[in-house]
Amino acid sequence: MTEKAEPATTLPNVAVIGTLAFLACCFMFSYLAYVGVSRTGLMAPVVLGWVIGLLTMRPLVDREKRASLYFAFGVSALMIFFVHQTYGYTGQVRNFPLIVGYTGIVLSILDVLGLSNTAMSAAIARLFGSHLDVTALGGRRIKRELIASAAMGGCVLGIWLLGFLFFTPIFVALWMLAGGKKVKNALYGGIFAVLFIYLLFELAFKYDLYRGIIFISLLDL
């Protein structure tokens, strides 16, 4: 009979030191933001905190799940860059992309914590999903998880480059095709998605959706 592996109740010294260093980076970021440092200057504690977070979490994750850990940190880096670039714009146009970016960062953090052998991982599993056997989690195939993470990262990158209205139908159609749907159904799904977003935000809410860095750059020419 397989014995269940219990999550760690106490953190190793390296993890404790890394957690304190990460909190110090958060404090540094808050202080620099308070004194009015530029958004580029604010990236210094963000990048340092990202590196410290990766080095701290790595020993807490089983070897067979580290590929998922690296991918989650990669997605979080993409989200951070997305938020950083979005703050370069002014007005209402940046509000919705910021919501997407910050939501992606939070989801990436939850994903990272959920991969660790800690009590926090068990709590996240109980809160957001079924509490599976740790040995089953350790032996799972990560292909589907990596595909889902890649899709989320590609979605954010596509929105940043092409904007919501142009990229949404592309993403929805590709996602439906990947799920085995017919080309005709995928096209209908993409058209429905872009019409729904346009009618809801642009017409009903009078909200100008983010147009994408390529379109904005072309307007500036």
Image (tube, grey):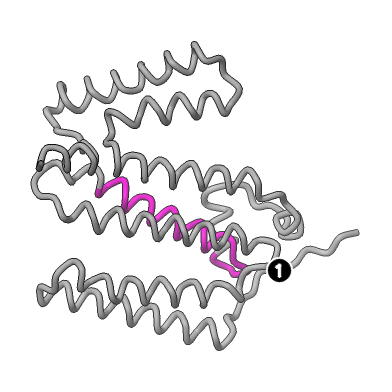
Q: Quadrant of residue 187?
A: top left
Majority secondary structure of the magenta segment? Answer: helix
Q: Position of residue 90 (x, y in %)?
A: 9, 49
Residue 31: image location, x then y, percent? 19, 78
Give the amino acid at mark 1.
Glu
Quarter occupied by the C terminus: top left
Magenta residues span 98-120
Q: Nearer the viewer, residue 8 or 59?
A: 59
In this rendered view, identify the residue nearer to me: 172 or 112.
172
Residue at horizontal 47 percent and vertical 62 percent from the top = 73
- Seen in the picture, residue 179 relative to 75 is either above or below; the reply is above
Q: In the image, is residue 115 part of the stretch drawn in magenta?
A: yes
| Residue named by callout 1 | 6
Residue drawn at x 8%, y 46% as measured from the top left: 91
- Mark 1 lies on a secondary structure that is loop
Instruction: Look at the image and say whether residue 100 sits in the magenta stretch.
Output: yes
Q: Residue at x 23, y 43 (%)?
A: 213
Residue occupying image coordinates x 16% and y 22%: 204
Q: Residue furthest right?
A: 1
Q: Residue furthest front?
A: 221
